Image (cartoon, rainbow, N blue to C red):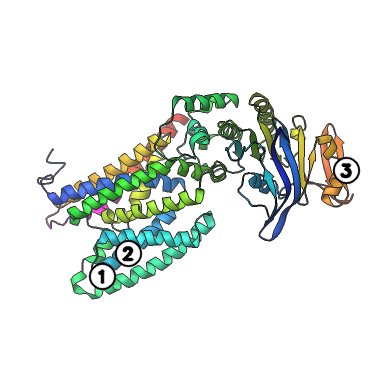
């Protein structure tokens, strides 16, 4: 437990009378890269919001052994931000909000603040974007900036909600490689939610697989197996490996859905 | 000052001094508050608060109270009603705004009808709906100045959390910002600002000062400080020039009937917006070439 950043213990969550999470148990260790994998609507965002204290558990608890939550040592990259093209906010100002956006008052930003902003923009390879308007960035550029915004306060744990959604395969790989480098350089634990496990296989230390409101957690090879996932889904599930890619196949053999690829139905 | 630009007697007229001062001060606060209003997509709420201010102003006219007190208290009560119905989510906010808008318009119609029945209140309807900057008293001037300073200070203190909550509410919550409380406080600031603006332009046109200058400034500035400066400058220029044009227009026709100040200010705000768009369009064409 000494190296545990966060532990989710026996948690149930109900939203509008519907049970979204049931008896969820897992933990994240310091410096670990974990993938929170599940199909759309599986409860990934709810789980992240629970960890951030934005959703209440109906049972169980989220434990922060090092008081990381209380000390705000959690960085968060939300799925959505309200950024129109016209928003008059430079990238460097937006990143600085991650450092002092919670503070009331009239204090001017110090040189140390701007140095940290430049440092973290450099870490996510976006230093040249500093003076651009944030609403004018491309999807890949915006993900880098959101990552810098979450990292700027030197968090112990970084929670990322579907940062790979809406990115093309090339941009997805760029962001995953960048995350892997940043995670090692900043020595920050990462929990990243995604519906496709494949782009993360090479970088994950742990998978937190969510299905049917339940969670299985552990090293990828121990979790992404037919017996574990069948127990999780409540019916038989196959795990197929093709050319180094993993496909989790549910349903009968005449028409199967692939949770990681909601649009793909194999007949 | 050249005679062709400013008619004689402008600067020696006390009513003009008061009008220009009130107009510029209110324009500065409105432009500053309006920038956040536009950023938070609350323009519709701002418009609805103006309509609630109409009910407040009309009620004040009916009972013989100060128009400023009526405008401000009406708008603040409207903001409270919106908050009570629910303003956190965009759809809730729209529904709450629509409900309050409908109720306020009905009350305005009733109060203005009752006002019109009394022949001694014949100018009240005109004053409530379209304002009368040259009739602002020196007492009202000081109240407007004091309230404007308080509004600016409140906005400066909550500015950073408000901006954070506006662009990324979940990240702001996760960082410890009391997003709902900041939103309520801002809605109150917006309500009081709309009430002040109603003194300058009347309640019907008061949203023009809140939305017009920030809308132009958003097309000019790169960062927030630059955009805020542009918004304030455009708002103040429209208010000051509007008073001058209105005063000058008295001499334009043999009938000696001046154009309403509210019309002149709004016309200048629209002119600014058109010029900024033209400038942007021209810049885009040059870039493309």
Compared with residue B176, is residue A110 higher up or lower down, i.e. above or below? Answer: above
Say whether residue B255 is magenta.
yes
Q: Which residue is mark 2?
A: B56
To which chain does the residue with label 1 belong? B
To which chain does the residue with label 2 belong? B
Label 1 and label 3: CA atoms lie apart by 78 Å
* Farthest residue, direction bottom: B117
Label 2 and label 3: CA atoms lie apart by 68 Å
- Mark number displayed over residue B63: 1
Answer with left or right where residue A186 lies relative to residue B143.
right
Residue at 38% across, 45% down? B155
Labels 1 and 2: the sequence-earlier one: 2
Compared with residue B19, is residue A116 higher up or lower down, i.e. above or below? Answer: above
| Residue in the foreground of this view, choosing between A117 and B103 | A117
Q: Which residue is mark 3?
A: A226
Residue at 26% across, 53% down? B200
Say whether residue A89 is magenta.
no
- State the image coordinates of residue A57 (x, y, percent, origin top left): 67, 52
Please tell me how many numbered marks the rendered image carries.
3
Quarter holding the N terminus of chain A is top right
Answer with left or right where residue B164 lies relative to residue B113.
right
């Amino acid at each position: 437990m000494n190296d545990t950043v966060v532990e989710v213990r026996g948690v149930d969550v109900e939203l509008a009378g519907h049970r979204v999470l049931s008896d969820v148990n897992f933990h994240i260790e310091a410096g670990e890269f974990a993938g929170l994998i599940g199909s759309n609507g599986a409860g990934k965002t709810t789980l992240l919001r629970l960890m951030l204290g934005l959703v209440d558990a109906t049972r169980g608890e989220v434990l922060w052994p090092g008081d990381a939550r209380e000390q705000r040592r959690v960085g968060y990259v939300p799925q959505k931000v309200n950024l129109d093209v016209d928003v008059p906010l430079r990238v460097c100002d937006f990143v600085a909000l991650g450092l002092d956006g919670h503070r009331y008052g009239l204090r001017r930003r110090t040189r140390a603040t701007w140095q940290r902003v430049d440092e973290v923009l450099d870490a996510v390879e976006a230093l040249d974007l500093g003076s651009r308007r944030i609403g004018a960035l491309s999807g890949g550029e915006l993900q880098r900036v959101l990552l810098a915004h979450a990292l700027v306060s030197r968090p112990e744990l970084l929670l990322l909600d579907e940062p790979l959604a809406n990115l093309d395969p090339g941009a997805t790989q760029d962001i995953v490689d960048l995350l892997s480098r940043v995670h090692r350089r900043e020595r920050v634990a990462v929990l990243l939610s995604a519906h496709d496990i494949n782009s993360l296989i090479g970088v994950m230390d742990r998978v937190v697989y969510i299905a049917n409101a339940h969670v299985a957690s552990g090293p990828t090879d121990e979790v992404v197996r037919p017996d574990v996932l069948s127990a999780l889904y409540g019916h038989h599930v196959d795990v197929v490996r093709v050319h180094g890619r993993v496909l989790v196949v549910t349903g009968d053999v005449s028409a199967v859905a692939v949770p990681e690829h909601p649009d793909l139905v194999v007949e | 000052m050249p005679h062709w630009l400013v008619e004689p007697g402008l600067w020696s007229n006390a009513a003009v001094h008061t009008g220009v001062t009130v107009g510029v001060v209110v324009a500065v606060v409105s432009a500053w508050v309006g920038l956040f209003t536009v950023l938070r997509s609350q323009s519709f709420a701002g418009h609805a608060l103006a309509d609630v201010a109409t009910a407040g102003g009309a009620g004040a006219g009916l009972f013989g109270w100060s128009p400023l007190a009526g405008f401000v208290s009406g708008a603040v009560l409207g903001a409270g009603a919106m908050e009570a119905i629910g303003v956190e989510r965009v759809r809730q906010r729209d529904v709450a705004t629509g409900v309050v808008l409908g109720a306020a318009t009905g009350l305005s119609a009733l109060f203005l009808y009752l006002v019109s029945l009394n022949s001694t209140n014949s100018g009240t309807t005109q004053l409530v709906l379209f304002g009368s900057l040259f009739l602002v008293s020196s007492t009202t001037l000081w109240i407007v100045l004091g309230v404007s300073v308080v509004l600016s200070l409140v906005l400066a203190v909550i500015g950073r959390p408000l901006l954070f909550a506006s662009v990324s509410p979940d990240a702001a919550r996760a960082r410890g910002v009391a997003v709902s409380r900041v939103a309520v406080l801002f809605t109150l600031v917006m309500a009081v600002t709309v009430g002040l603006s109603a003194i300058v332009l009347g309640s019907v046109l008061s949203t023009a000062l809140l939305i017009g200058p920030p809308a132009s400034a958003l097309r000019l500035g790169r960062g927030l400080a630059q955009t805020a400066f542009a918004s304030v400058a455009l708002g103040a220029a429209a208010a000051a020039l509007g008073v001058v044009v209105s005063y000058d227009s008295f001499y334009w026709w043999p009938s000696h009937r001046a154009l309403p100040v509210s019309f002149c200010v709004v016309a200048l705000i629209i002119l600014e917006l058109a010029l900024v768009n033209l400038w942007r369009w021209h810049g885009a064409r040059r870039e493309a070439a």
